[in-house]
Image: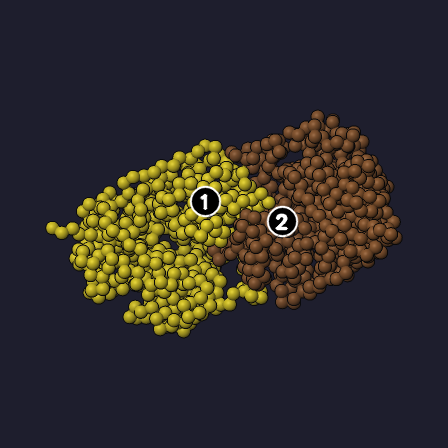
Chain colours: A brown, B yellow
Amino acid sequence: MAATYLIGLDFGTESARGVLVDSASGEVMESAVHPYRHGVMTRQLEDGTPLAFGWALQDAADYVEAGAEILGALGRGRVVASIGLDFTASSPLPVGGDGRPLSEALPGEPHAYVKLWKHRAAQPHAEAISARGGEFLRNFGGRVSGEWLLAKAAQLAEEAPTVWAATARFIEAGDWLVWQLTGQETRSLGLAAYKAQYTPEAGYPRDVVPGLEGRLAPPRPVGSPAGSLSGAWRKRTGIEGPAAVTVAVIDSHALLPAIGAVKTGCLVGALGTSAVYLVLAEAYRPLPAGIEGVARDGSIPGLWCYEAGQASFGDLLAWFARAFPTSPDPAECFGQYNEAAAAIAPGSSRLLVLDWWNGNRVPHADSALSGLILGLTMDTTAPQIYRALMESVCYGARSIVDRFVSGGFPIGRVLLASGLALSNPVLDQMMADVLGRTVEVPELGQATAIGAAIHGAVAAGVVSSYAEGAARYGARRIRTFSARPEHASAYESLYGEYAALVDSAEVRRAMHRLNRLASGGAPGSRPGRS
Amino acid sequence: MAATYLIGLDFGTESARGVLVDSASGEVMESAVHPYRHGVMTRQLEDGTPLAFGWALQDAADYVEAGAEILGALGRGRVVASIGLDFTASSPLPVGGDGRPLSEALPGEPHAYVKLWKHRAAQPHAEAISARGGEFLRNFGGRVSGEWLLAKAAQLAEEAPTVWAATARFIEAGDWLVWQLTGQETRSLGLAAYKAQYTPEAGYPRDVVPGLEGRLAPPRPVGSPAGSLSGAWRKRTGIEGPAAVTVAVIDSHALLPAIGAVKTGCLVGALGTSAVYLVLAEAYRPLPAGIEGVARDGSIPGLWCYEAGQASFGDLLAWFARAFPTSPDPAECFGQYNEAAAAIAPGSSRLLVLDWWNGNRVPHADSALSGLILGLTMDTTAPQIYRALMESVCYGARSIVDRFVSGGFPIGRVLLASGLALSNPVLDQMMADVLGRTVEVPELGQATAIGAAIHGAVAAGVVSSYAEGAARYGARRIRTFSARPEHASAYESLYGEYAALVDSAEVRRAMHRLNRLASGGAPGSRPGRS
């Protein structure tokens, strides 16, 4: 019998990645990456139409191109049992009744494009929705983030009513890509629950955005089949076999089965551009204060999965290396900063950073907040600042872990996943020191894409359970970092200072007022539509 | 008759500079610069003895070396009518009864060296003195700065009693150098009044630092003769003629006659590493809140001179170029940042900076405060931060100007002096826009040294008044920058945000607590004695 394969597709912020896995041995045979042709559009559209501050758009055609290239590269002439895919979220787009993105017909209209997860310009709409409130926010701490679908739908409906009128479906890009691959619309409970506050009991929230409910569709739990790869796609990619496509999974959640986190008691940190922290629980517990949301069947079927996040994580370090390069080669630049930062002792540079470059999720859920560096002196060096940025993202992580612990969740293990965790032991050790507990880093490259493949394997019946999928396809080795008592003790105090600054209303007011001044037409504020 | 000359000596933070001026024509014939051999010692002494955080020392022998080199280079074989000199302040040192610095005998003892103006480690002693209070603080807003002589004397007396016991004289480096040049101790009223709270009526403050009064000496007004250049120095430098040496002047104050600010109604900004703002008045008015001090006869004889300062100014920009170089050539690096920053519109980058890298003088008089950058996002660029730093020092200037205006001082003109003002029109224009008023930049290089020379000319009777000295030796052309209404309006709002953040107690508390954590022995805090 010829070998059969699984394909896992991971659609990230800048590019898509795919892995081809031998369904019997679990071995990763090949992988492929394809960057999005238009990347993230933050300043202008391709035709030069300017974008206002805080916008972040993508072109849905880029997903199709990347998906086709990767599926072709991995699957041509092969028997593929299943295709699982994960996607950034919430990254919704308006499409016509035929599923075509409105951006095809309206290439100069910003509102016709995918509003990427880190699009921040919908924040005022989120605040308005939160202010009105409703039972649908019970599992989300009583408020909607500006990054979620409801806020982005509200922004579209209010700011571009003619585009909204032309919108037959408002759909997460992950669900939209499943639709493209199979020829039928099948939405994901993971995307719907965490990003549009859907519950099986109450459905989507009613009357939040006029006309929105008619533009959505009921979702199915993750791990459900969504259909087979369509004829057109088979022709385009040369894939053979059943090629069962699964409903989409939120990218960070796709990690869980790949690193063996398929049961209660684990806290998983998915450290990427931003970071997401997930806690699985068999029984429902009330949402700890500041934690973003919880849903069942949206991450691992049958389990509740609590989610909290940091709006910037790895991209904070990338920002620094980009703004202050020490070398034209980014990797060399990171290496130099990392090495210099590792030699600096906790607290010695007196710096404190609020890691809010992309806004803050926990505890303020406010994407209009911004970053802060405090404690600068004439002796401050670039590596000290780099280290302080790294410390700040660890403090942000700790504030989330602490909330789960004080909310009564049994956190037996802390697992850190992603390429960043694998490649940066300085960061992993700092996490252990700041958290004051052992952290584990599963040694598995491309874990997100492999997780997506496991979802596909479950949906297609290649394995009988997530536990079996995790055992066959997931991480086999784990690196462990223990907290060093002296550092942990120093960070205990420093974290207290971070927490005090996080709570400072004076600091947050200043950030908000600066935004208002910039939007209020100070000379030279960036032109735009919002 | 052979030409006769004036020499002006300007002892700055990193180097000394001298000018040779034709006493009849007023022309600058030659100039010379000599860096201090040991520069500013902030981390260790020459023998490797470590210094604690906030320390900044100099070696008095470096002043003698620089003074001799410059006097020799400019004066050898020439008839010199007078030598005037200015000095950083407060930069005191302990000396023996013979005037020899204690550092000669105790080279491994940090307390035996000159505590440079920007030495910050005496701040707790300043706070203790301020807390006890006293009538001597009436003209200094009720408090002593950690940069002033009283605080530095207290630190020495309390932390190193054996060094204090060996101290016959505790003396400003400027007064000490006059002593070296003439062979007799003659102190300056300018140094004594502003840095040791001396008044002709009450003398030095009593019982502030045990034993201090006996280690000081009564001062003479600026523009007074201190004696002639000694035989040893004549031999060493080859100078001929009367070579009358004047009492020392505070470096920033020396500017005044060189740019024609010798009467009431001018506000002069001396923009250097740090910045000092001076306002001359014929009649005494109460010190406006937040302004540092006032004295009579300490700057221009017969006038009251109000002083306020910013602890960092040009060195904030220098710090940035040093921490984040774009080129190995500092001048090229500044040029690149300046050009890029000039193209950015006020408020567009949403950044707000507190310019406290060296602590804050107005309004908090707290050298333990530190710098802050707020409003960072993933779009923030290095030139935006550079511009925000530049804006922050202008905001700091405005807070001082506003205090004079609301204190009822008639500020008819704002004059900005120094090499920085002459070389950086982007900064000058920003000053006009932030202040919302016209600023004037006298076109005179080496103005401080020329001002020192004018003091010498007055003391030696070469001219009959400061007005005559200013007319003959001072600036002849002035460049004018007018506020641009659109920018001024934007900065009006942004300055309001700066002022609100300056007032934030939460921010200042965080800075203080970080200092305490670093001093409190977090692992790896810099070893030291304080």
Closer to us: A209 or B304:
A209
Side of A409 relative to B329 (left or right): right
Side of A364 relative to B340 (left or right): right
Position of the C terminus of chain A, as image quadrant, is: top right
- Considering the numbered disc 1 on the image, is that residue within a helix, a strand or a loop? helix
Residue on which disc 2 sits: A315
- Considering the numbered disc 2 on the image, is that residue within a helix, a strand or a loop? helix
Can residue B368 be seen in the rendering of this structure?
Answer: yes
Q: Numbered disc 1: what chain?
A: B
Residue B349 location (% of width, % of height): 54, 41
- Label of residue B336 in the image: 1
Which image quarter: residue B18?
bottom left
Residue A279 location (% of width, % of height): 77, 53
Which image quarter: residue B481?
top left
**Local crowd at mark 1 within 10 Å, few (<14), some, or many (≥20)?**
some
Name the residue type under label 1: Gln
Vertical relation: B324 (above or below) B151: above
Closer to us: A233 or A194:
A233
Assess whether mark 2 and mark 1 are in contact (beta carbons under 8 angstroms). no
Residue at horizontal 46 percent and vertical 68 percent from the top:
B50
Residue at horizontal 70 percent and vertical 28 percent from the top:
A105
Vertical relation: B98 (above or below) B243: below
Name the residue type under label 2: Asp
